[in-house]
Image (spheres, rainbow, N blue to C red):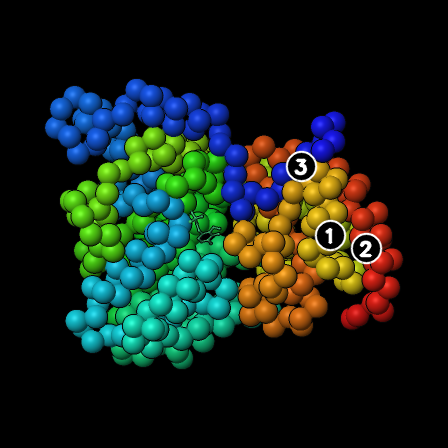
Amino acid sequence: MNDSLMRVYFDYNATTPLAPEVLEAVVRAARDEFGNASSVHHFGQQAKALLDEARSSVALLISGDPSEVVFTSGGTESDNFALRGSAEALEPTGRRHLIASAIEHEAVLNTVKALARRGWRTTILPVDSTGVASPDRLRELLTDDTAIVSVMHANNEIGTIQPIAELARIAHERGALVHTDAVQSVGKIPVDVRALGVDLLSLSAHKFNGPKGAGALWVKRGTRMQSILTGGKHERNRRAGTENVPAIAGLGVAARLAAGKMAAESARVGALRDRLEAGILNGVPGTVVNGAPHLRVPNTTNISFDRVEAESLLIALDLDGIAVSTGSACSSGTLEPSHVLRAMGFAAHRTQNSLRFSLGLFSTGEEVDRVIEVLPRLVEKLRGLTRKPVSA
Ligand code: PLP
């Protein structure tokens, strides 16, 4: 490996580096506050105080109430808890229909499949060519036995933001619960659970400079939920298991930092993303942006490179020190076409020639310049190797 290489990390949607304040909080909690938060003695109460503080910080970030925040091991568990927990609670009502958007993360899509195997009727809500789900289409798909509607707030691959408030209003008119996977929006744009009008919201610390393995499900007060982990009475009987206090303390600090920096950071990162995007579109012929240009989280751009296999470009960029992604972290490393781009109606070649650039807290203008400088040469080289005609 070339150690003098300038390393550029533009894969913040996969995961983010820890903020220094978060690292400090995690280390301090692991070292000094090792008690079990359920213990009544001093050590336990110290740990419990950290959980309380983190709960308040997370609640503040999403304008919820601390009592509505259930800590989990991250986005995947929160999504599982939201869908399985509400499905189990609602089964006695006779409602056994679930609707989820076509571009959900695997954490939702595979949970939907699991519920289908358990006898649930499941319907996929399509998206348009910019990745946006239509409220009118949702209205058509809802039935009197629809129990749950799950639509993500911002998409991890293209960054598109969904009209959650409108979708939630329509779903509620038919008596369905609404879950949103806000793993890619929390910490990046203002998220207000009341304004969104949802019942359940998933978030994950490692997407906004917190530690991996900590997240939360916000459960609106009064929502019927069944715990999916059986055991002790932790998290007010909603999630059994001794809390991961250091990681949750880190989540709390990350939430506080994100709330404090939101306006300035989203403007700064948005400007960098726009400069990167313009630089690529101008510098590399045969490129096009995927997603809704004006309805995206500010840190993400997903770009198709005509006549280039994304996987090859990703590897070439990595050899030049630049880390990006072909889409969702789970499917990178495989040649699977993106289910998100497929759902947007793109032809096979376009689902396999797209790269995601996602920026964040430590991204700089210098890094943007480096990518703009390196990309045209790499793309030209790869196109020279394939020599296929330019497709429309
Ligand atoms: N939901 C979305 C939209 C994501 O992007 C991710 C992570 O890639 C997850 C859920 C899963 O979160 P976690 O990695 O915390 O399990």
Q: Are marks 1 and 2 in contact (CB under 8 Å)?
A: yes
Q: Are marks 3 and 2 in contact (CB under 8 Å)?
A: no
Tag 2 or tag 3, which sits nearer the N-term? 3
For disc 1, the marked residue is 313
Q: Could one spot residue 288 in this view of the protein?
A: no
For disc 3, the marked residue is 8
Mark 1 or 3: the one toward you:
1
Camera-nearest residue between 128 and 372: 372
Looking at the rendered structure, the kind of residue marked 1 is: Leu
In the rendered structure, the answer to whether residue 126 lies left or right of residue 114 reads right
Q: Are marks 1 and 3 in contact (CB under 8 Å)?
A: no
Label 1 sits on a secondary structure element that is helix
Mark 3 or 2: the one toward you:
2
Tag 2 or tag 1, which sits nearer the N-term? 1
In the rendered structure, the answer to whether residue 95 lies left or right of residue 253 reads left
- Tell me what residue is drawn at x 27 percent, y 33 percent: 51
Tag 3 or tag 1, which sits nearer the N-term? 3
Label 2 sits on a secondary structure element that is helix
- Tell me what residue is drawn at x 18 percent, y 48 percent: 231
For disc 2, the marked residue is 382
Q: Quadrant of residue 212 in the image?
A: top left
- Tell me what residue is drawn at x 37 percent, y 63 percent: 111
Looking at the rendered structure, the kind of residue marked 2 is: Leu
* Percent x, y of residue 309: 73, 59
